[in-house]
Amino acid sequence: MRRPFSSYPVPETEYFERVLRHDPNSLTQLIAATSASLPPVRDLAARGLSLYAPWALLDAAWVSLARGRDSRPGATSADLHQILDLFLALDDPVTQEPEGMKRWEGYLQRATHHQGPWQEDAYAQLSRSIALLDQTPYPDDADDPLEVILPGWDHELLGCSLADYLGIVHLVWGCATAHPNPRRRGRFALDWLAVADYDQFDGLRSPAQVKTVLNRHFVTTKNKLRAAFPDDHDPLLRRYTHNPLRSSPLVGGVPGGYLVPVPAAVLGKATPLGLYYTGGDNKSEWGKAFTNDVGRLFERYVGRQLDLLLDAKIHPEVLVKISKKDKKKTIDFFVVFPDLVLLVEVKSTRPSEQLRLGGPDFTSLLLATPLKKAFEQINGSVDLLRSGKYPELADIPADRRMIGMVVTAELFHQINTPAYRAALPDTDIPVMVTSIAELEDAVTITSTSLAKLLCAADDAGVANLRQLFPQYEFLEHNAVLEQGWSAIPFARPCQPRSQDTAAAEPGSGPERRP
């Protein structure tokens, strides 16, 4: 770690004073221009740019816009460098806690959950959004029918089709990062587009329609940020909590169109997590139904991913008759390989803010998540299978090695390490918690069977499957994700557009990796 200008730890008041020394218009424009020119997060360290992480840039922009005063001196690149150095050295609860591993477990929870989402593959996340919510079939006669994710749901929630919403995100991101005129990077304006460019949308046909969607979901102002800035925040934890520029990554009311302080935050609006928070207002009945529907679709989406495996037979959930009056459901999927049975339980869950903040009560927080139930469900299915009593399970071999997998919608960092697994129920077979992003990669393995990868992961006691990925070869693309990507305007193949358009060339965009 670089030595900061000020010795660690830096109090938040000192960081605030340094940020607020500058006119917010000047500083945030500098942040936007700087952020627009940066490589992907995973390449920052190799380029000597670790200081310019998007979470640090976004925090400085938030503080400046919410607390800054106009007409103060402008900011230079050297000023921004010093501000980010102070951010790196900000005080943390770890300095207040007793010595021992417990204090560092909390710190790792905060750091990994704060920084991790910025490092997920944007191509996969945007593709997953439309593959999950728009392309995953759900039967009308299902026992547990969808409640609100029905034809037209996206227009009701977003003001346009889901594909067009993702197209707007791709367009704004492309403008902010790849406009031919470097002076326009870090910004977005609708009048930069030719009329013909709107043909790439499925339903949006005018700047006014796009502007309506932007103002509804993407745009904030200095006044809104100022009014919402928490006065009674914890100075040791504030930067780890929700930054409103994540929910509204465009700033209006500035000359020259919208300011885009950190373009990567725009992509976050179109990820499954971004859409989950857009629709999942648990204070409303519609919002509760939306999150339930996402969970229903997520289970079937995991099934679509498992169906990509060529050397395994997929058996869905089985209803087992225990007695005349008692029936019991198994886990969601049995994946039968020639030498392994993988028991998959799907949980459309994500770590809560309390868990992400790494407090001392993480054990009780983990037990309150659906992970506890998932482990118990795997245990119950193993018992049913090994008993040999139930004809409904006759097609599932009970004499092979078994591994359990809990597939989650978002990554629970550190979840497979001994300290965190100790907080969850013991299991009769090895069980790993795997995010959907890891599974999407894992099912494309070509140099060996996924079964051998899973056994190797279990034998090595690795914390996540990705640790072993460099040892194997994979398909260039996941077929389900590729189908999703091909439906996104300004990303899918299309006719060349005029040279003065601001977005990236057709078929390009957030870096795609296997």
Image: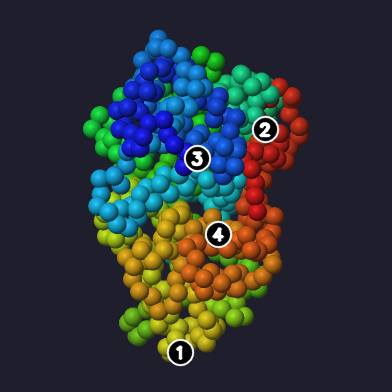
Spot occupied by residue 495 in the image (x, y as percentages of width and height): 76, 34
| Type of the residue with mark 3 | Gly
Instruction: State how far apart marks 2 and 3 are (Cα).
Output: 18 Å
Q: Most extreme residue toward the top, as rendered?
A: 71
Instruction: State how far apart marks 1 and 4 are (Cα).
Output: 35 Å
Total number of numbered labels? 4
Using the image, determine if residue 324 lies above or below residue 238: below
Disc 3 designates what residue?
A: 268
| Type of the residue with mark 1 | Gly
Contact (CB < 8 A) between labels 1 and 4? no
Disc 1 designates what residue?
A: 388
Label 2 crowding class (10 Å Cα cut-off): few <14, some 14-19, many 20+? many
- Which residue lies at the image location 54% right of the left edge and 55% below the top edge? 437
Disc 4 designates what residue?
A: 466
Q: Earlier in the sequence, mark 1 or mark 3?
A: 3
- Which residue lies at the image location 26% right of the left edge and 37% below the top edge? 234
